[in-house]
Amino acid sequence: MSDAERSSSEAAQPRPISRLPTEREALGFWLKLGCISFGGPAGQIAIMHDELVERRGWIRERQFLHALSFCFALPGPEAQQLATYVGWRMHGVRGALTAGGLFVLPSFVLICLLSFAYVEYGTVPEVAGVVRGLGAAVVGLVLAAVLRVGSRVARTPLAIALAAVSFAALMLGVPFPVLILGAALIGLLLGRVRPEEFRGLGQGEDPGDEQLPTPSNRRFWIARVLLVWLTPVLALLLIGGVIGQLAGFFTLTALVTFGGAYAVLPFVADLAVNRFHWLSPADMVAGLALGETTPGPLIMVNSFVGYLAGWTTQGSHAWALAAAATATFCTFAPSFVFILVGAPLVDRIPRQGPVASALAGISIAVVGVIAGLAVFVGDQVLVVDDRFDWLVAGLAVASFIAAWRYRLNVLLIIAGCAVVGLLATLR
């Protein structure tokens, strides 16, 4: 065997799990992740892959991609669901609640503080500078994620072609659920006629030797999870007023949020502005900007909408905070339900056969989806008022090189770009 073949063979081997962390170690990591998870789903998934798989070895590469395929097929924020799944895999229900909760909590606190400042003092120019720098960092991090994940998933000509078709379909406006369904069907077909195309994607691999947390009475467990979710939702609906409206609206929104925040936010904006009159179009644009400046899922914009809804209808910051908490709970509670009910099934999905082939197809399509997100973000931050932003372009290139070539800590990349953007605004 040549050196090149030997290196390729070694690269295809699954990275062993070094050791599972203690709950205290995991708590520290999830808190850190909640504070640095900028970049939207692509950037957040890239951070988790780098930290959990590459640096710490807390989960295997193929387990990570297997779970990612499952989360992409669910409504809701896939990055937060992936964190919840990894937390569940390591420490059961407590681990899931810790990982998923801390993925959201720092962002919720920041959004509420920024919402308070927005209501009291209006927008400030410095925010625009920080957003400018963060946008550059996001472009670089997402491009690095495309190459990193693509090099592990799209290894054969047909796999590369499927990723390219997914990218093209996304650019042409094909709805995300349709794209995922198409990728699953193509994967199913290729699994029957060209199974070698999925070589290295986990077919036939044992899911792991570690003991997996599994409910002993599954029906009772599902009923218990549903009760814990639906009881507070029902109580919020019974309160009525703006709290009840927010509970019903964002519960419904959470159940149809396929395709990520960018796909559902136009729907949220239309109803929040034009039907409920909770905020103005200018307020909604400000909320999107604030959402981009904070860690966590971009769908945290819902918390801003809730805060403004409480303030507009009641004129009280206490009511605004309660409304923001309502919007946040109803946005993310279904994601916890999906993972706590479905996570035990992920590890029972066969590593070969039709289901595995369909999920492999989704894994490959994810590469094209991440590339599409890179284009979307780049289009938003590189061209402003029909003018090309050379500062952002330079920062994006520097971020990409730092992440891809030098493996620099993501927090340093984000902080550096934010500082440069801020300083450029203060000139």
Image: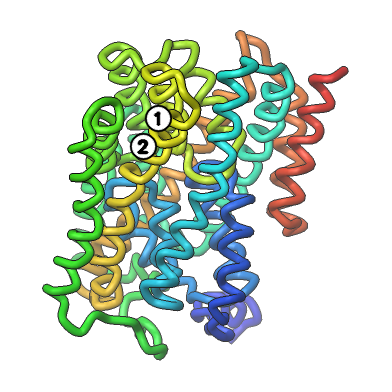
Question: Up-down: is 335 above or below 310?
Answer: below
**Mark 1 near mark 2, Cβ–Cβ under 8 Å?**
yes
Residue in view at x 39 percent, y 60 percent = 68
- Display coloring: rainbow
Tell me the tag on residue 314.
none
Label 2 is placed on what type of residue? Ala
Tell me the tag on residue 306.
1
Q: Residues within 10 Å of mark 2 (few under 14, many from 20)?
A: many
- Residue 275 is situated, as x and y percent measured from the top left of the image, at 26, 14
| Quadrant where the C terminus is found in the figure | top right
Tell me the tag on residue 327.
2
> Of 247 and 134, which appears nearest the observer?
247
Q: Residues within 10 Å of mark 1 (few under 14, many from 20)?
A: many
Residue in view at x 67 percent, y 35 percent = 134
Which quadrant holds residue 15?
Answer: bottom right
Label 1 is placed on what type of residue? Gly
Question: Up-down: is 225 above or below 252?
Answer: below
Q: Is residue 318 left or right of residue 114?
A: left
